[in-house]
Image (cartoon, grey):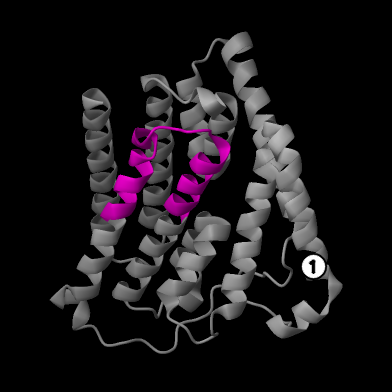
Amino acid sequence: MEHNTPLSTHFKDKHIWFDMAVLAAFFVIAHYFPLLKIVPLVGSLELFSFFAFHLLNNRSRFQLQGFLGGFISSTAIFLQTLNESKFSSANERELLLTLFFAVCAMLLECLFIIFFLSDGTPFVYYLPFAVQLACMGIAILHVSYNPKFAKQAPSAIPAEIVLLNDHPIIWKNVAKFSILILVLVAAMNFIGNELGFSQGISTFIVSLFEAHAILASVMTQWGAQARGFDLLALLLLILLGSTISKSYLAYKGPNLVRKRLFITIMFASLLTSATITVACYQLS
């Protein structure tokens, strides 16, 4: 992680106050134009990541860096830690925990997106992400206290995960992500209406590359009408796409030795999430 300007210096500059004022204004505007809710949501996540990275000591635990970095981009965390040579010396325990914490951050962000972009959505629609998050928590405890991992000698101070975040809110990133959501909404409508592909197929394909964007797109379309099994099926498809892509990155990454363990946990958590979610939906 890289941040060059001390946090106290930021508060002495007007830019941080300007960013927070603009963010507050977007919250007010989004109240009258619900389609724009994605803008203050992304801005809030940017601001959270900014404070988290500045408050995190440079020598903090490797996996905590993965968790905080996962709020910015879990895919970036996977690509860096699994492929860059500077992480090859990290032991398996540290590497697995970093990946699991990055997945946890992604799932938490998904829960924020559902909460923020919907109005009174029933709890069952949170379950796919909440259950997999609980499974990731169990996996973290397993890796943390399993004697096979506990006996590993600690590696040297791990290399830093590079995610530059030296500005409270990077509005260019907010604009890019917000535009991406709106483009996905239009593209999914076009694919369904003009090309004849189902919404499920288009949702699954996009989720292989960007789970957050497609989830925000789906919730923007459904909004307060978050009802029925069709929406639940789309949420499970998003998790399926994310699980497949992250398992593929783990399989191809040269730094991870226990590939089978990671992939097994990912798919087991997905199966558990789908089973519990469908069962609760049928009972509701």
- Residue beneath disc 1: 17
Residue found 57% across the figure and 71% down from its top? 52
Residue 115 in sight in this render: yes
Closest to the observer, 93 or 199 = 199
Residue found 37% across the figure and 71% down from its top? 95
Up-down relation of residue 196 to residue 8 (above or below): above
* Amino acid at circle 1: Trp
Rendered-image quadrant of the N terminus: bottom right
Q: Is residue 115 magenta?
A: yes
Residue 190 placement (x, y as % from top left):
65, 17
Magenta part of the chain: 106-135
Residue found 21% across the figure and 30% down from its top? 279
Residue 6 in sight in this render: no
Up-down relation of residue 110 to residue 166 (above or below): above
Closest to the observer, 177 or 117 = 117
Q: Is residue 113 magenta?
A: yes
Q: Image quarter for residue 50? A: bottom right
Q: Image quarter for residue 143? A: bottom left
Q: Image quarter for residue 99? A: bottom left
